[in-house]
Amino acid sequence: MKQQELGTKKVTEFFPTPPFNFDATMHKPSHFPSNDTQWQPGVRWQTMRWKGNYLGLKFEKVGTIGKPIVRLAIFSKEKLTRGYLDQLMNEINFRYDFQADLNEFNRLFEKETLLGEIINRWKGMRVATYVSLYEYLIVGIVLQNATVRRSVAMLQNLYEKYGVELAFDYKVLSAFWSPERLADVSETELRQLKVGYRAKALIKVSQAFVDGKMDELDLRTKDKETQRQTLLSLYGVGPATVGYILFDVFKHYGELRHISPWEQKIYSKLFFNKDPEDPVPVEKLLTFFDHTFGIYKMLVVHYIWEDLFWQRKNEQIPWLEKLIRL
DNA sequence: CATCAGGGCCCTG
DNA sequence: CAGGGCCCTGAT
């Protein structure tokens, strides 16, 4: 892997809408580990490839939940222009959902007996996506039909062959390749990285970004169903992957219409205290979420989901361990 | 040892 | 619209 030294540093600040929970926004314990990021309480490091530049980001918690400030150190090879920085800050505001208004959401659910407790515990948590749409698609594809261990290995292999290592703030973290880099490689070459039949999808998705068929900023201006159809037109991208993207990347808090078997078991346990061996039918779960949580249904699920995985960091949850295919 | 489903999706009939 | 196949791997 090539390495780049990011010696230039520029510090700036964000003012998220209150209430804002730094750690719950900047670290999602349910995500699988990858070498492009690192977190400790109050600090998150992240690599970023944006508009042709490689960047190292270091976010730090400065303010409080009620008066939030996020300090961001941006590391780059060359000095960045004012215009570039302004657009970068807009992009980060969007990806990390810093300007979200969750007042109505909080008001609607904070009084509920069990849910309210969870929402209050993580009050101000945002739907943060740390990568671009293209990069999220790559992650989505390596997740398909694989164990966590295998997905981690696939992404690692791809990083080693096509990615870049960025050295900044005394750390070395991996960063993504450009879509151009993958668009013309052979399927055989990719298959050597143990991605299996996903090779074809990785190439075709890359090509869609290169020839402009897929454009993240343009898609953001479209409505949800147009976004869905556009994403579904990508080879190797189906309803499951698109569901995650509409929520995580495009911030549709009510997007939930696909539930995979392991998620079904977890929801059955959490919401109905049903044994994973005998889960609630998916159709019933979907109707329940829709009727109870409406336009916020996936956001509610996200709070409960992350709460569960935060617990898992501290204590063993035996029934959960069985459902996570490591 | 074999078989099978899977943190899906495509293609066929 | 149902069902088989696909890279692999872990479970049975």
Image (cartoon, coloured by chain):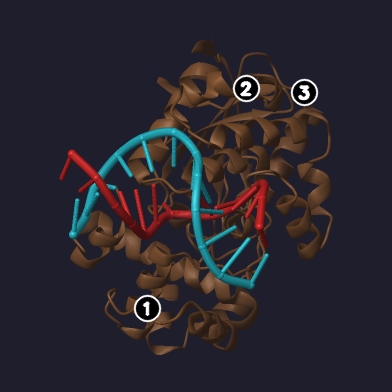
Chain colours: A brown, B red, C cyan
Mark with earlier residue (1, 3): 3
- Point 22% across, 67% down: residue: A319
- Point 48% across, 32% down: residue: A195
Disc 2 from disc 1: Cα separation:
43 Å
- Point 38% across, 81% down: residue: A271
Instruction: Give me the disc on residue A54.
Output: 2
Q: Which residue is mark 1?
A: A268
Measuring from the top left, give residue A257's x and y in whole percent.
60, 71
Disc 3 from disc 2: Cα separation:
14 Å
Q: Residue type at mark 3?
A: Thr
Q: Residue type at mark 2?
A: Tyr
Q: Which residue is mark 3?
A: A81
The chain holding disc 2 is A
Q: With respect to residue A313, does A167 lie above or below?
A: above
Dot 1 falls on a residue whose secondary structure is helix
Q: Residue type at mark 1?
A: Ser
Dot 3 falls on a residue whose secondary structure is loop
Dot 2 falls on a residue whose secondary structure is strand
Measuring from the top left, give residue A53's x and y in whole percent.
68, 22
The chain holding disc 3 is A
Instruction: Respond whether the residues carrying marks 3 and 2 are from the same subunit.
Output: yes
Q: In the image, which is nearer the foreground, mark 3 or mark 2?
A: 2
Q: With respect to residue A205, does B2 lie above or below?
A: below
Q: Nearer the viewer, residue A55 or A299?
A: A299
Judge left or right: residue A11 versus residue A307.
Answer: right
Quarter of the view holding residue A246: bottom right
Measuring from the top left, give residue A3's x and y in whole percent.
51, 11
Q: In the image, which is nearer the foreground, mark 1 or mark 3?
A: 1
Disc 1 from disc 3: Cα separation:
51 Å
Q: Nearer the viewer, residue A237 or C2?
A: C2
Q: With respect to residue A303, does A5 lie above or below?
A: above
The chain holding disc 1 is A
